[in-house]
Image (cartoon, grey):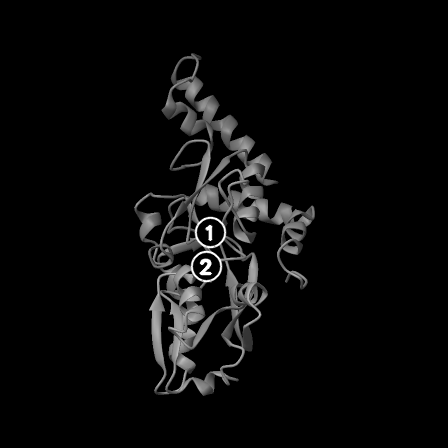
Amino acid sequence: MSARQLRNGLAALAAATLLAACGGGEADTPAAEGEASGFDLVSDGTLTACSDVPYPPFEVEDTSAPSGYSGFDIDLLQAIADDLGLELAVEDVSFDALQSGTVLAAGQCDLGASAITITEERQANLDFAEPYYDSLQSLLVPADSGIESIEDLEGMTVGVQQGTTGKSYTEENAPEGTEIVEYPSDGELWPALQAGQIDAILQDLPVNVVHTQDDEGFVIVEEYATDESYGFALSKDGNPELLDAINESLAGLREDGTYQEIYDSYFATDAS
């Protein structure tokens, strides 16, 4: 069954139940409309995503996009929302509040879409849709820094993003004597490196690749295979119907080539 078939079936069942309860009258109240959508959403008819912006190439502000944002995550989520017959709205939040599940538990959004790595620790507080992207960690430094590997960071300062797997990797692998400085997002990390306030950044490879493309004065000296996969996150056991529909839609987008088209617009290598 496709995501669209699932949605239509749920909508028909909800509508039939409501009509029976009302003796066949019209169902035109907001509550009835919410039931007819087939999903328990923050705003009826709208898929509301929380994301930490900017995090190029996954999330960037874009006034030309329907939601006001674009990037690989957002474009893929827009395709899912379109498939489910929903509008897409994006809320900019801190990554730490998102990966911990706080904003989802508070009902601020329906799901998180922010290059969120699926980990056992996060699965204790979140439900994840099927993985949609495999990533690596990487070390970004000034081209003339003399830093060639993570082992060269002893006595130096490396920036990481709060609550991320990049932070965990740095804590576990950087040599003793490395100063690790946490920032709320890449929006603070990247300017800090450019200004010489830190000596390096350790974070997701695609984000660092964008920085090398934007400024040739910076290079990636190492990549780290960490077996990381990103997934859209939902509140734990909070919306199983929406989770199933997202998974159905993802599968359909892969099958009809839409996923590959979106992927190719952001990345030069083949999708995994």
Residue type beneath disc 1: Ala
Q: Secondary structure at mark 1?
A: loop
Which residue bears the numbered disc 2? 116
Q: Quadrant of the N terminus?
A: top right
Which residue bears the numbered disc 1? 113
Q: Quadrant of the C terminus?
A: bottom right
* Image vertical order of residue 189 relative to residue 144, above or below: above
Residue drawn 46% across and 62% down?
118
Task: Report crowding for label 1: few under 14, some 14 to 19, many 20 or more residues within 10 A (C-alpha).
Answer: many
Q: Are the residues at dot 2 and dot 1 in contact (C-beta closer than 8 Å)? A: yes
In the rendering, at what x and y percent does residue 38 appear? 47, 33
Residue drawn 41% across and 17% down?
28
In the rendering, at what x and y percent does residue 179 appear? 34, 80
* Image vertical order of residue 119 relative to residue 41, above or below: below
Nearer the observer, 9 or 37: 37
Residue drawn 38% across and 57% down?
95
* Image vertical order of residue 49 relative to residue 264, above or below: above
Q: Is residue 104 left or right of residue 216?
A: left
